Image: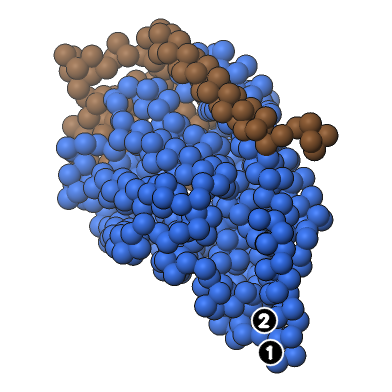
Amino acid sequence: MAQAFTKEMSRNIFYGGTAFFFLLFLALTFDTHLALPERDNRAALDPATERGQLIAQGKQLWEENDCIGCHTLLGEGAYFAPELGNVYTRYGNSKEAIMGFIKGRPKDGIPGRRSMPQFNLSDEELAAIAEFLQYVSEIDTANWPPNIQG
Amino acid sequence: MTFKYQSQAVAMPYFIAAIGLFVAQILFGLIIGLQYVWGDFLFPEIPFNVARMVHTNALIVWLLMGFMGAAYYLVPEESETELHMPWLATLMFWVFLVAAALTVAGYLLVPYATLAEITGNDLLPTMGREFLEQPTITKLGIVVVALAFLFNIGMTILKGRKTVVSLVLLMGLVGLAVFFLFSFFNPTNLVHDKFWWWWTVHLWVEGVWELILGAILAFVLIKVTGVDREIIEKWLYLIIAMTLITGIIGTGHHYYWIGTPEYWQWWGSVFSALEPIPFFMMTVFAFNMVNKRRRNHPNKAATLWALGTAVMAFLGAGVWGFLHTLAPVNYYTHGSQITAAHGHMAFYGAYVMINLAIISYAVPILRGREANSEKAQVVEMWAFWLMTVSIVFITLFLTGAGILQVYLQRFSDNPLSFMVVQDKIELFYWLRFVAGVGFLIGLVVYIWSFFIPGEKTAAEMPAMEAQGSERGAVEAAAG
């Protein structure tokens, strides 16, 4: 068997298999991008609208405060703090509730417990983050998370 | 000197810095492990997200440092020629180290938003995404270092002997650089952002990094077993073939719940369920080669790390990955402590251990001896078991935490809120922290092993010389 199966054959399986499955992956990627307009809530992102601009600002604030360093968003991120992909619905479809929570975090934390830092965001910035989180909650995620608790 | 090409010595600073960053990674891992149970520990000076960034980024950078050191060590030997530009390798080492140090200092000294501001994140926003938190300017630095490194390695391979090991290594390293470029793509559309983010993250760790892992493992096995290169290279091709055949479409297991079409639940489940196969082959391969060894290399510790890599990568990446990769299971486990459990053992088994294997093999040679003294090796093997057993327990405790979390928060009839569940599973986080302390002890023992006199004692000397000549004979026979 050692003679029957040569190094050249295993090399060909590697190159052939890799090329085939990478091309298949590219095809699936292409198809995914055709399907996304129906699922990814891109209508909300229109930069010509005030909402679209607010969401873009909110996403950048989300990134520049490293929110993903504690939270998950659609299940990706750190597991130290709650999932935020559905926080808008969990908070009763209320952007004000989200803004109020972020704004009200104590500067020195809560003794002995996990607490979100006080980021000292302006009202406009808070509104942008809340708008971003509402946009995320309207993405079609195949019914994930399983329930409102995230 | 026992190494054949003088320029192999440029690997040494890479290995030293890798171990230094490894220590930082573990210390910050303990901080965040403690913050899980002692919520305001170091708050607000070092909040969880900052310490976690140091933990994960230090890991990534030290693994890259180790890969580079490995390449600088093994490519001249495989190519049978000196490195193309040794000075460039040394220069890039300092560039990389200073960039890493400045980035970590930035994380720790100023709020992340300030760091984003002073590094001009506005011009090309790439920050604030998991594992890619580095300022854009650091990312550009990584690209420069990677290009200089690839140029140096590529030219060396081009002018010398071309082996399968160095070719596979080069393909892995080129892939690493190419897929990193997706880290600069950060659209506002979150689904696009996440989709392409995985082209860096998944196609690194479940794609091209496995080529690097396979090549380094093959190199170490050729050296410590003396088995015919033809056989090892055949295995290497087959293993990396299965890696990419399963792993590329396997990216689909990240496309279940992020807004992408539902057919990914089928593609992702089927192909990622096959991802353990190359790891299982790697285990069979490593044990087979060691059983068929044609020499008894005096460096027992390096052999142990090589075998450990294969086993632990199979358990961590293969078994623990399979555990939650099927879409109907992942629906409940996605983004839970189950994910964390898998991440810890997979990274340790596959990438930490392969780095420690090549360091274990190469550093004694770079220090002028074929292998360390028995005593130094025994201490190193103690470190192997302490760290490995600790990571097994970290993984088991996180798995326990994850099962409870998934049940209480997502599966039961009366789902509880995230923080209520976190309080209920606190015991597992304490146990995980204790296992983490065990890991740190293992790491201290590991570092201690470098300071034990490595020269052979007079009693061991004749045996070593006999083995040395045996090595020459075997290598001559193997061609």
Residue B326: which disc? none
Q: Is residue B143 left or right of residue B462?
A: left
* Residue under the image location 70 percent in, 80 percent down: B465
Q: Determine the secondary structure under disc 2.
A: loop
Residue displayed at 51% across by 39% down: B208
- What colour is chain B? blue
Nearest to the observer: residue B428 or residue B414: B428
Residue picked out by circle 2 = B373
The colour of chain A is brown
Quarter placement of the N terminus of chain A: top right
**Residue depicted at 57% across the width and 44% down the height:** B164
Residue type at mark 1 is Thr
C-alpha span from label 2 to label 1: 7 Å
Do the numbered discs 2 and 1 sit on residues whose CB atoms are within 8 Å? Answer: yes
- Give the colour scheme shown: by chain
The reply to whether residue B55 is visible in this rendering is no
Question: Between disc 2 and disc 1, whose residue precedes?
Answer: 2
Relative to residue A96, is residue A21 drawn left or right? right
Q: How many marks overall?
A: 2
**To which quarter of the image does residue B330 belong?**
top right
Of residues B83 and A115, the one drawn nearer to the viewer in this rendering? B83
Badge 1 element: loop
* Spot occupied by residue B210 in the image (x, y as percentages of width and height): 57, 42
Looking at this view, is B63 or B5 the one in front? B5
* Horizontal arrangement in the rendering, residue B403 relative to residue B263 (left or right): right
- Do discs 2 and 1 share a chain? yes
Task: Determine if residue A41 is in view.
Answer: yes
Q: Is residue A141 above or below residue B355?
A: above
Q: State the residue at coordinates (71%, 80%).
A: B464
* Three-letter code, disc 2: Ser
Query: Which residue is disc 1 drawn over?
Result: B457
The chain ID associated with circle 1 is B
